Amino acid sequence: MNSLGVHAGKPGEPGDRVATMALNTHRHLELYYAVPCSGAVLHPINIRLAQNHIIYTINHSEDKIIFFDDLFLPLVEAIYDKIKDTVEKFVYMSDKPGLPDTKIDNLYEYEVLLEQGSEEFEWPHLSEDNYATLCYTTGTTGLPKGAMFTHRALYLQTIHLIAHASFVNDPSYVLLGENIVFMMITPLYHIHAWCAPFIYGFLTAKLVLPGTFTVEGFCELVQTEGVTDTAVVPTILALLTEYKDLDNYDLSSLTYVRVGGGALPLGLKTKVEKRIPGFSATSGYGMTETAPTTVRSFVKKYMSEWSKEKLDEVRVKSGLPIPGIEVEVVDENGKPVPHDNKTLGQIVIRGPWVIEKYYKNPEKTAEVWYDGWFHTGDVAKVDEEDFIIIADRMSDVIRSGSEMVPTILLENLANMADFIIEATVVGVPDDVWGEKPLAIIKLLPDSNKTEDDFIEFLKAEGVDKGKITNWMLPKLVAIVDEVPKTSVGKYNKREIRKNLKKYLAIAKDMKQNEAK
Amino acid sequence: MNSLGVHAGKPGEPGDRVATMALNTHRHLELYYAVPCSGAVLHPINIRLAQNHIIYTINHSEDKIIFFDDLFLPLVEAIYDKIKDTVEKFVYMSDKPGLPDTKIDNLYEYEVLLEQGSEEFEWPHLSEDNYATLCYTTGTTGLPKGAMFTHRALYLQTIHLIAHASFVNDPSYVLLGENIVFMMITPLYHIHAWCAPFIYGFLTAKLVLPGTFTVEGFCELVQTEGVTDTAVVPTILALLTEYKDLDNYDLSSLTYVRVGGGALPLGLKTKVEKRIPGFSATSGYGMTETAPTTVRSFVKKYMSEWSKEKLDEVRVKSGLPIPGIEVEVVDENGKPVPHDNKTLGQIVIRGPWVIEKYYKNPEKTAEVWYDGWFHTGDVAKVDEEDFIIIADRMSDVIRSGSEMVPTILLENLANMADFIIEATVVGVPDDVWGEKPLAIIKLLPDSNKTEDDFIEFLKAEGVDKGKITNWMLPKLVAIVDEVPKTSVGKYNKREIRKNLKKYLAIAKDMKQNEAK
């Protein structure tokens, strides 16, 4: 860092911002330690953002240097004219020696810089209040917002996540210590890859860096490297269950997957564990602003006699707060909702790894930070065991009459059907109820099931078993080839609402559900 | 606390000091949380100190209130006149209702105060820099010194000790989570009972509080409560190995013991594990000023193929620094000694749970805190695996000619002999060498071994195996009925030096070792 003229920050004042545009490679991991430890602030650019948002985050962050993979040379060239007044230096990272022929000025070669670096480099003594990273939200509802984290915040999150695993009483949850072989699939440009560089660095565990995710690559690396643990979004699990050649690989080393970035449907958990025996998936919850992990699901000691079915239902709940951070579900007056597995409220959070403010954005900060809590905009209920269960985004929840239809609950139910691969639910305008639920589903290839079969399934598994009420059933069902997804693999409801006409045109009106 | 008029402190400024004179009871544990969480400072009085030292610590600490067990009523009455100008209120803790007939003014009944307490009590919001506890050193070499700890220091020690257990790769080391049943034998008046109230509170583990330690009581509680873990000084392990009725109890739940407060001799570890199969002992190191734990021994992944004998040798080394704290062994110029398992140096420590200063004692602070490190006064070497191995106290090390004879090394060797129960080594004046080693040993009852057998054993196991050199062998050996011990169960070398004539009178001069 030093030879590039990077300036360290002071406690509470960020040092120079240094950005990355890179996949999960060893170089990216090196920068995860090198940049913050030199006193600068690491800005891992989410290369899946829209190009204008990428340009926005670079200029908003005022990145002084960008380190980029050779793969992203065309992208950097494409946005070069719009960032070159901000960015002073570019560093090219490649397995092949030499620099490319390009219009980019001030281009350095990563491996050459390393060779020229002094072995005597003395790391500066930093305060725990020095800033370490700057991560931007995906900006699905406006411009990306910057979340900046101190060394203290990252360290405390790491040590609490590790300590948390120590008191978990679930053999399918923990496999700790130096024996872990962790494959880092969540991109390093998605909120610290969920803390993986720090947790597994602390544990001196072996890290497997796949570059980018492919199902084939995943299976090959598990087989050759003996991968034991990983952490993924639900979509990745869905891809694994669909993969035809899965049985050709030896995946027996796999024991544990942490699922985040979206609710883990019980059906999906069951499917993936049937295809990869010994592999256990559990749920969690967090967001960019919380670095990200705040809640994880696990089995408590008093549950040890419960049946596997009942325990699996526990493991797919969003979970309990990680010790060290406070998470509450509150009503409109900021009062905690009853733990009745029914009443919905908003999740609010405070603690050492929650951002205090958005970077250079006091207006957005004021929208989320008030009454002493960070307001997540996520809707949840709390059950009798004190487990938090995410119901929806505030903006996605369907308001039907005076009631709220929690779409994630419907989606989880839908995913339990063995003929369903993907399912999402959005609210569409309705003259009578204000809004009504539209389900958009993708069937298993060669399935001959219909919209009616889908609704019958929801009735049998949802209504009859008391998980949802009759009036929550989708009034419209559209069968599609592909459900739109965001860059992080979540269902893109914004995209669906934008193209609502298209979906309404193919949706079947389920008249039989009209009666409330 | 509130009803007794206790004042909370501000960050960096201690609140009122509230003392305890109590054994390991549920009331003492309650005070461990109640006092610091109300903003006051808990001073657990070491009731094994000399009476004048107890009086000194109470007046030096300016304790406003003392909570004491009924058992200690005579002690409180005995010192009453010398502390009554300092202490405003006394609280009597007993299973039996009512107050005793006593000259103590302002005496309250613990259980009555609890009954009268408001259930609506609102805990104050404290800063992490609020002081929580004040613990005094045992003062074996002068007046006791006060070590005061913030909530931050205690919390960070707790969470790091828990996280540390997560990456340990030794099946005989870890048994974590809610399944632990921990018996708290180390007294709560000895430096936070080695952090047990905080660690096992965090883990929501079951705590067994024996009051005070007896071998019979220990065995009974293990059997009835299913105790899995404990932490003790080596002396307690020695008592267990000697106990004739041990085999009458079902001790099969016992799996793990952390040993501290003195080096764990390999011989003692072997003996106790032979008598209690499945029970595994490992070593550690710390002191009052470090809250206390800083170093623990454990098996690393790369050692996993080593033989049990070799691993046991690792487990009795003092260990590796706990992550989160820095521990070095340095020469007289403050330079780290080579990791050659030979060169001796002083242990220096710095990190979030090391005291910044002695309470109201700048002179003593200056003696230990300089060059950016806390100087422990403990002599150690570092082996090729980077494990720290305590050799001696600076003040105990024997200076023979220009060489240092590390007495703890000799004691550990001696403890490997199956005819030895206790063994210590001190330096006595010598015309030629300046000092020479005197061994004071206690033999197994009915043993017919002699002083010569002892030296022969040291030669065979020590000199011949390269662990010590010939000139380190004791020049004098005294066989005694009991080796003097301090209140914390360590060999009391000060006491021995005070009564040196007595020991020299019975010691045998081992002429054959004179040749260097």
Image: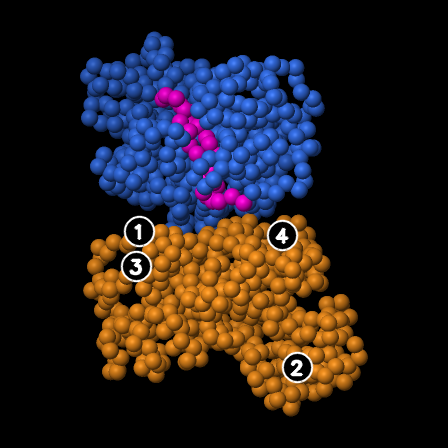
Chain colours: A orange, B blue
Q: Which mark is residue A163?
A: none
**What is the three-letter code of the residue carrying label 4?**
Lys
Residue A125, numbered label: 1
Mark earlier in primary sequence (4, 2): 4
Magenta region includes residue B504: no
- Which chain is disc 3 placed on? A
Q: CA distance from mark 1 to mark 3?
A: 10 Å
As for residue B134 lying within the magenta part, the answer is yes
Q: Chain of mark 1?
A: A
Question: Which residue sits at x=43%, y=39%?
Answer: B12
Considering the numbered disc 1 on the image, is that residue within a helix, a strand or a loop? Answer: loop
Q: Nearer the viewer, residue B488 or B39?
A: B39
| Magenta-drawn segment | B125-152
SS state under label 4: loop
Question: Type of residue at label 3?
Answer: Ala
> In the rendered structure, which disc, 3 or 4, sits on the residue that comes first in sequence?
3
The residue carrying mark 2 is A428
Q: Which mark is residue A300?
A: 4
Seen in the picture, residue B508 relative to A275 is either above or below; the reply is: above
Q: Quadrant of the N terminus of chain B?
A: top right
Q: Mark 1 and mark 3, same subunit?
A: yes
Instruction: Establish whether labels 1 and 4 are both on one chain.
Output: yes
Dot 2 amino acid type:
Val
